[in-house]
Image (cartoon, grey):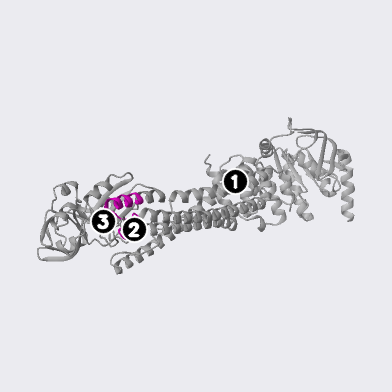
Amino acid sequence: MIRINNIHKSYVTGSNSLHVLKGIDLEIEQGEFVSIMGSSGSGKSTLLNILGILDNYDEGSYYLDGALVKDMSEKKAAKLRNELIGFVFQSFNLISFKNAMENVALPLYYQGVSRKKRNKIALQYLDKMGLLEWAEHMPNELSGGQKQRVAIARSLISKPKIIFADEPTGALDTSTSYEVMEILKEINAEGITIILVTHEHDIAAMTDKIIRLNDGVIAEIIKNGDLKEWQNQFSKELQTA
Amino acid sequence: MFDIDKWQEILATIRKNKMRTFLTGFSVAWGIFMLMILLGSGNGLSNGVAQNFMRDAINGMWFWSGETSIPYQGLKEGRQIRLDNDDYELIKDLPGIEYTSGRYYLRGNTFSYGSEYGEYTAITCHPELKEVESIEIIAGRFINQLDINETRKSVVLGKDIYDALFKKADAIGEYVRINNIPFKVVGVCKEGGGTRHRNAYVPVSTGQKVFNGGNRLHSFALTINATTIEGSNAIEEEIRELLGRNHKFEASDRSALGSYNKVEDFLEFLKIFTAIDIFIWIIGIGTLIAGVVGVSNIMLIVVKERTKEIGIRKAIGASPGSVISLVLLESVLITTIAGYIGLVLGAGLMEGINFIVEQQYAASAATNSGNGETLFRNPTVDINIAIAATTLLIVAGAIAGYIPAKRAARIKPIEALRDE
């Protein structure tokens, strides 16, 4: 599904160049539930942006669903994002002057689906998220957890193959965070690949594979058996805490 | 191209952002409104002054005889100058002259018809006077060459005379007595631009013959085809010198031969109009530029304000083109509607002013024996100019919106979304 080789990325601000990603190799299969961890400045958000075609990279190669993503035209990138990818952000990023239903329906607008039809579909997805009665509410009338569920519904409506989540629980309290993670798990169970960035161990522990970034390179990949141990360790930590 | 869904999206955006919409629209409507008022006032002033001038043909020139005031070739001053038909024949064929009419004044003319009578002025003339003094025929015809050649006793009555003598009865073919001599009415007329019509016109040849004028003429009225002050002055000088030679007086003696050159006055006035026009256009263009800057500013702010929204739209699959068209069509829609509102309000106000001015004009015309005085008439704007100005603002708004919209469409969604 995703294959990247030796990805480099620098940010140039004035005369300073900040080398953020220093050669990342990674492969993620269809249906995986992966988390990217790392301290702040380790390059995890940058990596997610590159994977989500929200940002470009300087060196290396990135194959998404078998196609090389490099120096892509804005229009093509937009089309790929629309068809293949769903985004969930820490700050929800709902359009403030549109109600929940219209926000959810927006990706379908860019697919040319008629207003009536896309609003109907949006209501189905809101129903799935348990937010049917909030469909006509504006984002500022919703709680953080509700906003994030609207955002998830929006990311799902275009039936993407991958969902990228950038700190999806970063602005939520623990119990709401767990609710959101439960939803993501259900989505993953339906076969959609989920890649999320987090710095919270307990959130990462709910995923199947943890990629730990450190200073622009992959420090370790924890999965399967190791992950179980890791999960135990952190659930113990949680219990003692 | 016309995509109902896209317009619904735009209308929804406008509805949810009323303040922004109002500000953009207001600056456009205000700019057009002010422009309409400025141009309308300028036109009103021009029309008002021009109308005061248009009573006679604007290219008219008049000569009248008097007494010499300067000795000439050994002849003393104080001689009466007598113009005659020969002078008419000479002047008529000079280059640069369009229409010429000689005049012989008759004094104390009593007009009567049946039991009605009154004192009016009978003017003797050539058929060309109709063009020189913009005489408007409302019934029958004006004096023609046949009347002159056959010294017919024909008369064209001013409307006021007709009203007084005939009381709306049919006058054409009837005989009116002027100083007890019957004249056949051939037409009824109005004087150009004026509201008094108390003159009657008879053929100059008949006038001379019937009222013992011999071949004398008192004055000439003519129109010239000069378009510059210099050209009209040259023609005036030429005629003065010609008549001076024939009648032995100094060409510069304005007492011997009075003259009035309307072209000169009119062209002087035209210069003032041109100056007013330029002044109004400078202010108008200034207003337009202010409008353009206002729209541009608002569009810059709108795009800045919408950066995050644009980032979101791009993240979920909006192409740069769709982002640009969303921002631009919104701006074009608002500026078009607002421009139209400004246009209608401006035109409405000028129409209102026009209504008041016309009433005042009618009132002053009634008190001032029919001669309405006004400096301000018909203050309307050429609709093409108004539409062009509105289009300019719309285009300017679109360009002003396009540049930041394009930049916003180009930035990476992640940068747009970074700021909280």
3 or 1: tag closer to the N-terminus? 3
Let me know if residue A98 appears in the view. no
* Residue A156: percent from left, percent from top: 68, 43
Name the residue that disc number 1 marks.
Answer: B399
B315 displayed left or right of B327: right
Residue positioned most to the bottom:
B367
Q: Is residue A237 found inside the magenta-colored segment of the image?
A: no
Chain that bears disc 2? B
Mark 1: which amino acid? Ile
Q: Which residues are magenta?
A: B236-260
Q: Are marks 3 and 1 in contact (CB under 8 Å)?
A: no
The local secondary structure at tag 2 comes to loop
Name the residue that disc number 2 marks.
Answer: B253
* Foreground of the two, B4 or B271: B271
Mark 3: which amino acid? Ser
Residue B250, numbered label: none
Between disc 2 and disc 1, the foreground one is 2
Name the residue that disc number 3 marks.
Answer: B219
The local secondary structure at tag 3 comes to strand
The quarter of the rendered structure image containing the N terminus of chain A is top right
* Residue A48: percent from left, percent from top: 78, 42
Residue at (30%, 45%) from the top-left corner? Answer: B94
* Residue B413: percent from left, percent from top: 71, 44
- Mark 2 crowdedness (10 Å alpha carbons): few <14, some 14-19, many ≥20: some
Are labels 3 and 1 on one chain? yes
Say which quarter of the image contains residue B74: bottom left
Let me know if residue B259 appears in the view. yes
Q: CA distance from mark 3 to mark 1?
A: 65 Å
The quarter of the rendered structure image containing the C terminus of chain A is bottom right
